[in-house]
Image (cartoon, grey):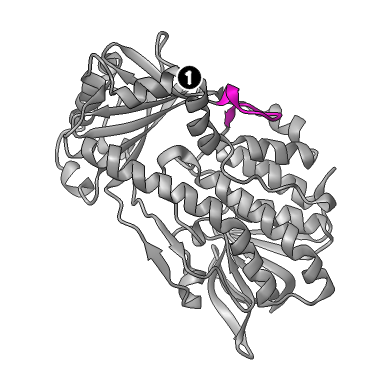
Amino acid sequence: MDRTTVCVAGGGPAGMVLGLLLARAGIEVTVLEKHDDFLRDFRGDTVHPPTLDLLDDLGLGKQFAALPQSRIQQVQVPYKGGSLVLGDLSLLRGRHDYIAMVPQWDLLDLLAKAAREEPTFTLRMGTEATGLIRENGRVAGVTYTTRDGGSGRIHADLTVACDGRTSLLRAEAGLRSKPYPTPMDVWWYRLPKHDGDPSGIVGLLGNHRAAVMIDRADYWQCATLIRKGTDAQARRTPIENLMRDMAEAAPWLADRADALSSWDDVKVLDVKLDRLRQWHIDGLLCLGDAAHAMSPVGGVGINLAVQDAVAAARLLAAPIKRGTLSTKDLAKVRRRRLLPTVVVQTMQRIAHAKALKPALDGEVNIAQSVVPPRPLRLMARIPALRRIPALIVGRGLLTEPTPVFARR
């Protein structure tokens, strides 16, 4: 049996940021990551302006800038006559007017290295939180198993669930979420990038097909949306059908008909959109996807999760150090982060209903339109309107200030 002050379950962006910030406050914190490393393909690799600002404040900006990366400033939607820029991050104020595309494992390795320099930080790889320890009516830590078959218990004053949309800890705590319908699941795969291709984030709306293509400099990371629950049936058809549909939506992809050799090249994501009614019980707090599973629309889930972690560290560090942490303190985190979460999820639900569902049902095909719809033309023409999606996608509604104790 071990003991720590704060136990964080999940070594994703939220868990690693929270662990680093609390350790810099002098708080003993242990992060549990169930995998032996951070190398997982098709994780969200967007690093948004608020996270870039945070890295600068933490003294990690130069190290991050040295990582291989590409930068995105525009969100585009192509149509038969060209493409429209619907979001332009260069219009944003602040130190960073772009989204950095960096493999998530590089970001997590950078955060882990910085956190290990703090004497109160421990990262336990290959260790998965499997249950909650309860004492006197409150959560008092977690049980865990290790990749080599070991098991144990870690007692903690505070346990934080950063273990994603299928969070075991939030289920164990009996926390109930409000689900929202989603019309799609997502296929993740890579396509080669050729000279003459568009740049930035490219959205496609075709006949029964909607996709987002993320510019990775020498390849495209593609997220193709499919109607909910149709993955198994689609995998019984030739893989060439996927590229045929993509080429119909974006004719410039026609020369990549054989880019995917089999369905093994395509991963499926079960899209969920939900939000906990309450993010905590005594001794436990949920953050990121464990508190609010996000749709991939806009690629903003990572930014929200990191901002959750920054808010939690800033609001909770003092009562944790004083030994006075209460459920009232934990409730402050939800109150602080609820509005930006609700706004983003509302925008995603509108996009699901007004754009994605009609596209997946074959009711709209912007890519084959000679003239795109008037609302899109207006948004592309007026800079003030292009700033709105850039602000929502790039910075979000509320940027959390970096805690003073964590700055370097």
Query: Which residue has dot 1 on it?
Result: 218
Mark 1 is surrounded, within 10 Å at the Cα level, by few (under 14), some (14 to 19) or many (20 or more) other residues, namely few
Q: Residue at coordinates 52% horizontally, 70% vertically from top-left?
A: 278
Q: Residue at coordinates 71% horizontally, 29% vertically from top-left?
A: 95
Q: Is residue 171 above or below residue 180?
A: below
Instruction: Work out whether residue 247 can be spotted.
Output: no
Q: Quadrant of residue 224?
A: top left
Instruction: Work out whether residue 331 can be spotted.
Output: yes
Kind of element beneath mark 1: loop
Q: Where does the image place residue 388, in percent across and percent down from the top left?
A: 50, 32
Q: Residue at coordinates 22% horizontally, 51% vertically from top-left?
A: 229
Q: How many marks can you see?
A: 1
Who is closer to the viewer here, 68 or 404?
404
Task: Tell me the amino acid under the disc marked 1.
Answer: Asp
Q: Is residue 86 left or right of residue 248?
A: right
Q: Where does the image place residue 243, in percent across and percent down from the top left?
A: 24, 26
Who is closer to the viewer here, 164 or 336?
336
Q: Where does the image place residue 8, in percent across and percent down from the top left?
A: 64, 64
Q: Where does the image place residue 173, in percent across and percent down from the top left?
A: 51, 77
Q: Is residue 15 above or below residue 63?
A: below
Q: Is residue 122 left or right of residue 237?
A: right
Image quadrant for the C terminus?
A: top right
Q: Is residue 92 magenta?
A: yes
Magenta stretch? 89-100
Q: Is residue 363 left or right of residue 182?
A: left
